[in-house]
Image (cartoon, rainbow, N blue to C red):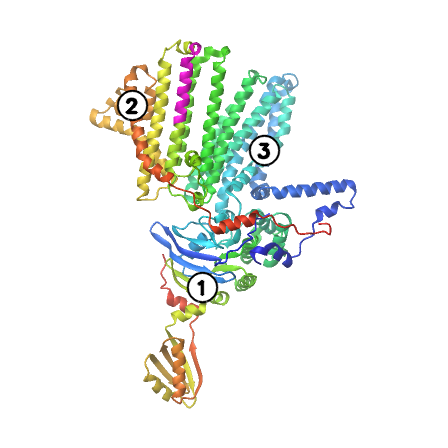
Amino acid sequence: MISTPSTTSSGPIIEVRHLCRYFDRAKAVDDISFSVKRGQVFGYIGPNGAGKTTSMRILSTLDQPTSGDAYVDGFSVVDDPDRVRRRLGFMPDYFGTYSNMNVVEYLDFFARSYGLRGDDRRRALNYVMDFTQLESLRYKPIGGLSKGMKQRLCLGRTMVHDPAVLVLDEPAAGLDPRARIELREMIGRLASDGKTVLISSHILTELAEMCDIVGIIELGKMLAVGSVADIQRSQQRHSQIRVRALGGARPLAAWLGERDGIRQITAEGETATFIHDGDEQSEADLLRDMIAAGFRVAAFGSQTKSLEDVFMQVTAGKVQ
Amino acid sequence: MRQTGNQSTMASVSPIPQIVEEGAAVGAPPAFARWAKLGAWLERMGERLNPILVKECRQSLKSRQFAITFALVLAACWLWSIFGVTLIGPSIYYSGAAAGTKMFEGYFFILAVALLIVVPFGAFRSLADERDDRTFELLAITTLRPRQIVAGKLGSAIIQMLVYLSAVSPCLGFTYLLRGIELPTILLALGYCLLTSVGLSILCLLAGTVALARQWYSLLSALMVLLLIGNFGFTISGEVGIVMGSSVLNYGSADFWHAVGGFLLAHVSYDTLFFLAATARLTFPSENRSTPLRIAMLSQHLLLTFAFAWFVTRIASNATRELAPMLIESLTPYCILLTIHWYVMGAFMTGETSQLSDRAKRGLPQSFVGRAILTWFTPGSATGYVFAVANLLAMTLVVHAVLLYVWLDPGLRMQATLSAGRANFDRTSQLNLLLFGYAAFYLGLGRIVTGALRRVATVRMAGAVMLNVLLVLVGCITPLLIEEIFAGRGRWSSGYSLLYVFNPFYSISSSQSSALSGQIELALVIVLGSASVVFLANLRAVAAELRRTRVAAPERVAEDDAALAVKPVAIPVTPWD
């Protein structure tokens, strides 16, 4: 019988403290810190060679930090890797499948390796097969599976011992659109089941939809951590605003031109577009002043940056 | 699905499958019921099997390599049966003495190819395959312990050995029926082969753990092939020795079985050491990987010492007192074996780092007595150095105790001094002290140099071991170079001088010559003095490692331990529960 973790810490389920990993002089991970609460989906974003995989490997107890530590459910990945392993499932960016094995044998082996015995193991296998929809491929040799099916199998292997934390390194890489959508749905289901998911991906639009918080890493340094909206806000020191003023935008444009912090004003018909340097509060003040000045504002909207825009703004595109 | 309720959540998502084994037994005819019970029992036993063993058996028995080798072994046995019987001809009916032996050697050769080459190399490959298939990391992050991984791979190798043996066993039975070879001889030869195969498989698994690092793979593959082929010849000659010498082997003699037992113990002790070393290599770096190995090393020392003590008591008995000179002579291999043992082990131990993880500190001894005795078993290069030196010192004490015992017993002393007077005593004592001094000196020096290098660069354990070997080589080669430079070509061969004092091989071989006794005595003083200086130079590091104290496990770990210690409440499944 698996030594099922029966207690949980009250703090964050993942806590990374000043983590560093150096390979000789190269700083793969350089003093990163962040934490993830239970049930959150954390998106790990960064260019290739930024240090995502290295930090995920440390978190999964596959590598040791040069300094610093990381905690999973309150257990140090350095000092208590065995306890961390019971609580964490890691899906690397490769398949790692055995030859001469079929789907059920593969999952059965990993279930046994996590200490599941007897009915517990059978239940776990049935659940995983059902979840990943691999039931019909139960006795199919692994070598004959498609990439998407192998990815499902690997997800099944990762969750066979019912870990509280799932660390998924580029799970959607190389999958066709359908397989990617199905995988995203599965991760969504895991998140709704209360699992904490730490996921890295290059497909930022998907991450933006899926993640509660994201961390942007480059050259081993964490550049920004927080919810997508928070990061957008923190990075957005100026916004593009579009205003529709009834009766024509030209007087409005002239009025705007006299104000500080407003530039690149264009007016066309009833719509004026301009760049406003300031935060949301300042935008609200501007709208209030506009109405007070007698303009008949029918629409006022600032265009928020997408995660991709934020990513491009935060990172400089450098790699180690 | 949360941690606390994982099983129940799973059950809610996916209904519990019906357990059919027990149900099948109910209402079935008695014969079927028995089979069903047996099936259920086997399944329960299967649950307890090592997962790696299950996986490896599933994989290897389905593999093309196994199928081909198995078919080849069977075909070779058939061919040898036909060819051998044809060769012996009609005389097979009456001149069985030669026929059985000849046929056995043929079958043994076929079996040995599978057991001594194919199976151990398969064990080596099985770990290398994990790296190639990129499955090792997936395995490493499961809750399997490294011991289970190595034991599973070894178990699979043993099962393959048994499968091959079972395929060849009818042929071996056939050789017994032909006469000319006794059953104990067959069993002894097979036992020898199986034991060697197990030992080689463990050694290959140890090499496989090193070969998980890609840069070592090619070199180690070549080394393993050479080792296996070299050992194949050695084992075959051993088997020929057993079969040919079977007429003089006295199976009823206690001495024979003592010798077999001694060989078995020595084999098992090294198998255990290599097994633990393979396990340690797969263990997470923050864990204490050193203590089990140190216990195994000490056990080997004790085993050899007990075997030697048994030998001493046998000789000291009245019936065999004339063998007293042999007793003194036997101290030489005892010293040499133990010095090699502790020098090699010491090179690895002094290659450890002095830093101890918090995890390892949780297990440090706490009481005064515990710290005094057990600290030397804890990881660290300085504790390792003291551990090796202390054991070498124990060896020296044993040797001198035996010498004193023989000297103080008039009967034994008379027998021991009959041919060479006191010289045997002196030479043995000098040899022993030289061995002790050189080992303590070079290990200590190696530790100091490694420590200094580690301040400026990364030195791994393999590097530290190489450094130890390099220091001995420097000690051997430098005097030659000095003499070559200052005395001219060819002059260095003039004989032993104090210039060679740090060449252990030359000094030790020279210590057996009575003509050099004066120089050797001086060399001994220099070597022991240098060893003492090096030991003192290491004391600071020893003191630093001694100051390490136990740290308490974090509260979270204590909470988890307490929760795991509580047995789960049995869930009633029938109205009678």
Q: Is residue B208 visible?
A: no
Q: Residues within 10 Å of mark 1 (few under 14, many from 20)?
A: many
Residue B109: % across, % down: 55, 28
Mark 3 in CB contact with mark 2 (< 8 angstroms): no
Residue depth check, mark 3 versus mark 2: number of the one nearer the observer: 2
Magenta stretch secondary structure, dominant? helix
Tag 3 residue: B73
Three-letter code, disc 3: Val
Q: Is residue B146 left or right of residue A311?
A: right
Q: Label 3's element? A: helix
Q: Nearer the viewer, residue B68 or B39?
A: B39
Please provide the residue range marked out in magenta: B393-412
B424 is higher (above) or lower (below) than A220? above
Residue at mark 2 to residue at mark 1: CA–CA distance: 70 Å
Q: Residues within 10 Å of mark 3 (few under 14, many from 20)?
A: many
Residue B79: % across, % down: 60, 29
Three-letter code, disc 1: Val
Kindly identify which chain the residue marked by label 3 belongs to. Answer: B
B56 is higher (above) or lower (below) than B106? below
Kindly identify which chain the residue marked by label 1 belongs to. Answer: A
Three-letter code, disc 2: Val
Q: Nearer the viewer, residue B186 or A166?
A: A166
Tag 1 residue: A214
Residue A273: % across, % down: 39, 81
B375 is higher (above) or lower (below) than B261? below
Q: Is residue B399 magenta?
A: yes
Q: Is residue B417 magenta?
A: no
Q: Is residue A266 visible?
A: yes
Mark 3 in CB contact with mark 1 (< 8 angstroms): no
B137 is higher (above) or lower (below) than B220? below
Kindly identify which chain the residue marked by label 2 belongs to. Answer: B
Tag 2 residue: B525
